[in-house]
Image (cartoon, rainbow, N blue to C red):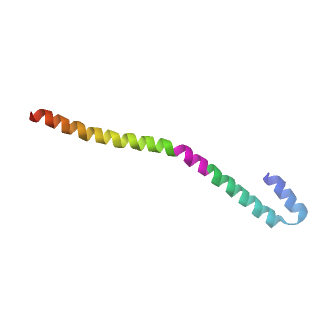
Amino acid sequence: MTVAMIKIGEETGLMDQAMHTTGELHAKILLDKIAKMTALIEPALIISLGSLVGYVAWGLVAGMFSLYGQAS
């Protein structure tokens, strides 16, 4: 597509406009791909952070229960 835009820009004499349009199009495509990638990564991050917090909470509660069992 970029090659086609360069050819059109050369034929019409509007190379700067063709390159500007190509740059905007590529920037939009990049932003769309970044949005999709973050949408795919977000659930994995939530699950991993949730399990980390759960592990720490489990460790604290298990420690309290073991101390309670030793006291009685």
Query: Which residue is painted at 79% across and 51% down in the image?
Result: 1
Q: Is residue 70 left or right of residue 18?
A: left
Q: Is residue 13 left or right of residue 35?
A: right
Q: Is residue 63 above or below residue 38?
A: above
Residue toward you, 19 or 57: 57
Q: Is residue 11 above or below residue 49?
A: below
Task: Count the marks.
Answer: 0
What percent of the width, then of the height, locates residue 5? Answer: 82, 56
Residue toward you, 53 or 10: 53
What percent of the width, then of the height, locates residue 48? Answer: 42, 41
Query: Which residue is painted at 84% across and 53% down in the image?
Result: 4
Query: Which residue is painted at 45% across and 44% down in the image?
Result: 46
Q: Is the C terminus in the top left, top right, bottom left or bottom right quadrant?
A: top left
What percent of the width, then of the height, locates residue 22? Answer: 76, 58
Picture quadrant of residue 52: top left
Q: Residue furthest right?
A: 11
What secondary structure is the magenta-colored segment mainly?
Answer: helix
Residue 35 is one of the magenta-drawn residues: yes
The residue segment tinted magenta is 34-41
What percent of the width, then of the height, locates residue 34? Answer: 60, 51
